[in-house]
């Protein structure tokens, strides 16, 4: 699937974010009265949001704000010599800031789980892992989703830039090829003209030589190479 299709699909995907536990009541309130039953702490219901909505609500640029400008200092080749893309450089040029727990790190956790496990079990495991780290690192599932979506948008912007640069670069080379082909055609025409002039000149010289040979034949003895010599 192309990056454009992945980005278009991702923006409309619906995600059920893991519920966040309600804050515990403070000790002072719990001791306010032993006779008054205190409400139990219950997790908030799961929030269902689209990826695009999650990205808008997460600090950082929206999908349509992620762009990569052309380099102006130099005019490099459209791609690296070996064709390898430096993803971190792409994300940096797109203005994405590093996050505490990246989409790539989440992918490592996802891929470490047995594929035979039901998707619900794997999701719960990964969400629990992120929640455990969130207490110390300040990360959550929404941040991981936003990081993945923004990086796909950055890669899409980079693809657009490469496509534009390649089109411009190839167009320049094609113009040079056209100019060279025009010059080649002109040179071929010159070659044909020169060869035609040569053939004309050679014919004229041969004809004139034969005409002058009559003088030589006229004054020489009718022997040897003379055309008048007897066989």
Image (cartoon, rainbow, N blue to C red):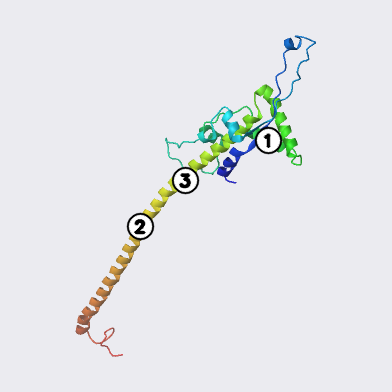
| Disc sitting over residue 182 in the figure | 2
Q: Nearer the viewer, mark 2 or mark 1?
A: 1
Q: Residue at x 63, y 31 (%)?
A: 144
Residue 100, image x and y in percent? 62, 27
Q: Nearer the viewer, mark 2 or mark 3?
A: 3
Mark 2 to mark 3: distance in Å? Answer: 24 Å
Q: Secondary structure at mark 3?
A: helix
Q: Secondary structure at mark 1?
A: helix
For marks 3 and 1, the one nearer the N-term is 1
Q: Residue at x 52, y 35 (%)?
A: 64
Neighbour tally class for label 3: few under 14, some 14-19, many 20 plus, Cα within 10 Å: some
For marks 2 and 1, the one nearer the N-term is 1
Q: Secondary structure at mark 2?
A: helix
Residue 111, image x and y in percent? 70, 38
Neighbour tally class for label 2: few under 14, some 14-19, many 20 plus, Cα within 10 Å: few
Image quadrant of residue 221?
Answer: bottom left
Q: What residue does disc 3 label? A: 166
Q: How many marks?
A: 3
Question: For this rendering, which residue is in front, 200 or 18?
Answer: 18
Q: What residue does disc 1 label? A: 108
| Disc sitting over residue 118 in the figure | none
- Position of the C terminus, as image quadrant, is bottom left
Q: Is residue 200 left or right of residue 173?
A: left
Image quadrant of residue 135?
Answer: top right
- Up/down of 194 relative to 130, above or below: below
Q: Is residue 63 left or right of residue 103?
A: left
């Amino acid at each position: 699937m192309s990056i454009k299709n992945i980005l278009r699909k991702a923006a409309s995907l619906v995600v059920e974010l893991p519920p966040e536990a309600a804050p515990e009541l403070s000790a002072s309130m719990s001791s306010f009265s032993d006779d008054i039953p205190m409400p139990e702490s219950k997790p908030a219901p799961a929030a269902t949001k689209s990826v695009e909505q999650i990205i808008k609500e997460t600090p950082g640029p929206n999908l349509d704000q992620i762009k990569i400008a052309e380099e102006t200092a130099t005019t490099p080749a459209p791609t690296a010599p070996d064709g390898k893309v430096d993803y971190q450089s792409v994300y940096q040029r797109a203005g994405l800031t590093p996050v505490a727990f990246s989409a790539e790190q989440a992918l490592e956790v996802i891929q470490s789980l047995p594929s035979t496990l039901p998707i619900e079990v794997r999701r719960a495991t990964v969400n629990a892992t992120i929640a455990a780290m969130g207490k110390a690192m300040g990360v959550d599932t929404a941040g991981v989703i936003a990081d993945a979506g923004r990086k796909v948008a950055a890669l899409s912007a980079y693809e657009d830039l490469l496509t534009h640069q390649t089109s411009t670069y190839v167009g320049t080379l094609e113009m040079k090829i056209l100019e060279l082909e025009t010059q080649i055609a002109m040179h071929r025409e010159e070659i044909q003209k020169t060869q035609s002039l040569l053939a004309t000149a050679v014919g004229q010289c041969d004809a004139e030589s034969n005409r002058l040979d009559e003088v030589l034949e006229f004054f020489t003895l009718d022997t040897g190479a003379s055309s008048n010599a007897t066989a």
